[in-house]
Amino acid sequence: MTTDTTITEVVLPGIVEPDGLLLHRRAMPVPARGQALIQVEATGISFAEQQMRHALYPGQPKFPFVPGYDLVGTVRAVGPGGDDTLVGTRVAAVTKTGAWATYALVDIDALTAVPLGLDPVAAETVVVNGVTAWQMLRDADLTAGQTILVHGANGGVGSVLVQLGRHLGLRVIGTAAARHHAGLRELGVEPLDYREPEMAARVRELSPGGVDAVFDPVAGPGVRTSYALLAPGGKLVVYGNAAAVGTGQSVVWVFVKLLTRLYTWNALPNGHRAGFYNFWAGQLTRRAAFRRRLRTDLGIVLDLLLQGVIVPQIAARYPLSEVSAALVFAENRSRAGKVVLEP
């Protein structure tokens, strides 16, 4: 049980620049039945929070709210009827919002135990990012020896995705800025500069028959190129809409256009598959099954991290009090991996 009486949390008050984030103190919350109070040791900055700052993330709360998509921390209290043996254990959770704080209330059935010996910051790099990468690769139904193309291979999800791909015996081509190429080569990736005008031609040189899957977090005009690079029966997996940032377009309209295009492509008789990966699919209609699957998949990824199959890609570490600077650093994408806040 904690002796603290207040918590500090980051509040996103509206569509503001990073320096418009607010630090707010309030009384320590008390867990209700089915909840646990988590002392947050690490929480990440993902592309989702960058979209939320622009009001571009589908289903985000109304302003103001506390961002923070995932966390790693220690259970300090449980609600009435809860299992007291959880107190003192280190856990990870995907929260969607609310994790940018010194303490957070999380549903107990959303918690996954973190293996002993794992550093909380290292574990944080694979919570939402690792589950996303693992589920996308598994659902793509690929086999060893096949070739995949990963756009944004240096990013939070991309850097885990390429490592899992190599672990599964896949050949990985990854796009990123040239400054990230040396690091990608160390991970066994064949890097290409996404800004190179002839990037698509370079992919075709490396894989003349096309690639077996493309993982695209951008969903802009280049999604057509991604689709065109597929081998017969190949799979296009879109898992973000980074191209929508800064366009001024409605996020709903951008998303509807994207889904329409993907469904139209699926009707073509070429055997290709195109789809949008939704991390939260099934949460509303099959909540218990969704959370069981999430706990299982996160447990697998954390074990792979413990085994050294995944090397944590930490772009930078910041205290919670420097969240504005951390967000600027994350949005500049100057270093590979994930930016982590340490409350």
Image: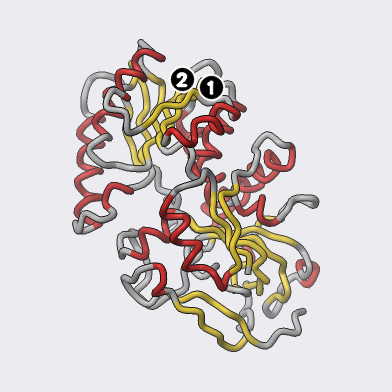
Pick the residue in front: 219 or 317.
317
Horizontally, residue 62 falls left or right of residue 257, namely right
* Residue type, label 2: Thr
The correct choice, above or below, for 325 with respect to 269 in the image is below
Q: Position of residue 196 (x, y in %)?
A: 31, 28
Which quadrant, please, contains the C terminus?
bottom right
Q: Position of residue 94 (x, y in %)?
A: 55, 58
Q: Position of residue 3 (x, y in %)?
A: 76, 84
Where on the picture, by quarter, is residue 1? bottom right
Q: CA distance from mark 2 to mark 1?
A: 6 Å
Where on the picture, by quarter, is residue 288? bottom right
The correct choice, above or below, for 172 with respect to 176 in the image is above
Check disc 2: other Cα within 10 Å, few if <14, some if 14-19, many if 20+: many
Label 2 belongs to which residue?
A: 147
Q: Residue at x 52, y 43 (%)?
A: 336
Label 1 belongs to which residue?
A: 170
Does residue 65 appear anywhere in the picture? yes
* Residue type, label 1: Leu
The correct choice, above or below, for 90 with respect to 269 in the image is below
Check disc 1: other Cα within 10 Å, few if <14, some if 14-19, many if 20+: some
Q: Residue at x 37, y 63 (%)?
A: 52
Pick the residue in front: 131 or 195.
195
Q: Residue at x 60, y 28 (%)?
A: 186
Where on the picture, by quarter, is residue 21? bottom left
What SS does tag 2 mark?
A: strand
Choose the circle earlier in sequence order: 2 or 1: 2
Horizontally, residue 163 falls left or right of residue 180, namely right
What SS does tag 1 mark?
A: loop
Say if mark 2 contacts mark 1, CB within 8 Å. Answer: yes
Q: Position of residue 84 (x, y in %)?
A: 78, 72
